[in-house]
Amino acid sequence: MTYIIGMVSQKGGAGKSTLARLFARELAADDFAVKIADLDTQQTTCAEWAADRAEAGIEPEIQVQAYAKIETALREASRFDAFILDGRPHSSDQTMQIAKAADLIVIPTGQTKDDLRPAVKLAHSLADAGIPEEKIAFALVKTTNSQAELMAAREYLDQTDYTVLDGHLPVSTAYGTAHDVGRAVTETTHKSLNVKAETLAQSIIDRLAALAPKQEVA
């Protein structure tokens, strides 16, 4: 059986591809067969990153492929333990298709209300369309070093009926540098940043396992 994870957002640059690469790397490091379906054909961020990673010879190798249609992507899903759908921003139809196919939908958001409000609005629109609330989770990304602001963001999200994942990804040039050379955000040269990313990845794994216990997840 295959776990299907959807990374969705209505805003560009929200952190979908960062989360897709993070999650894929952590599963692959634990010997799961994993693939990212890069559905943003205008950017192909994940596909280009995977090419950089392969060129640099970084292990584990991450399989990524760009797809124009989600139906085509899903035909490949059964070949993998985990199949990650990295969706386009500003694409309500595709986002809904991803949500219907996924065992878990992860919505990245920053900590300001400019980010939180559209993230919650997207979650509500999915729930209103019949997606179970327990399948929807928020991931805090591009946060500042202010614990007060981070806690305020968590409190804002906790008022909803959706899961708020543990951990967060702060704004850091080290994360960007890692991506530039084909690495994930758990593969920086800074242990503290890697730990933050690992905490978030583990929270995704734990939530997925609770929702869809098809096999033991790392």
Image: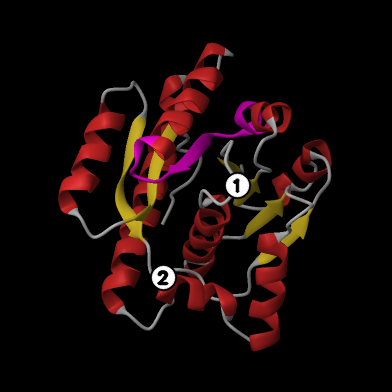
Q: Mark 1 points at which residue?
A: 12
Residue at (70%, 33%) from the top-left corner? 91
Count of residue discs: 2
Q: Mark 2 packing: few (<14 Cα in 10 Å), some, or many (20+)?
A: many
Note whether 79 is above or below 9 in the view shown.
Answer: below
Residue 66 sits inside the magenta stretch: no
Image: magenta residue range: 98-113
Q: Could you say whether the residue bearing mark 2 is in a helix, strand or loop? A: loop
Q: Mark 1 packing: few (<14 Cα in 10 Å), some, or many (20+)?
A: few
Residue at (23%, 60%) from the top-left corner? 145
Residue 170 location (% of width, % of height): 34, 60
Q: Could you say whether the residue bearing mark 1 is in a helix, strand or loop? A: loop
Q: Name the residue under label 2.
A: 186
Q: In this view, does 88 lie to the left or right of 129?
A: right
Question: Residue flagged by tag 2: what amino acid is it?
Answer: Thr
Quarter containing the C terminus: bottom left
Residue placed most toward the observer, 149 or 38: 149
Q: Residue 130 carries which label?
A: none
Residue 77 location (% of width, % of height): 71, 46
Residue placed most toward the observer, 210 or 39: 39
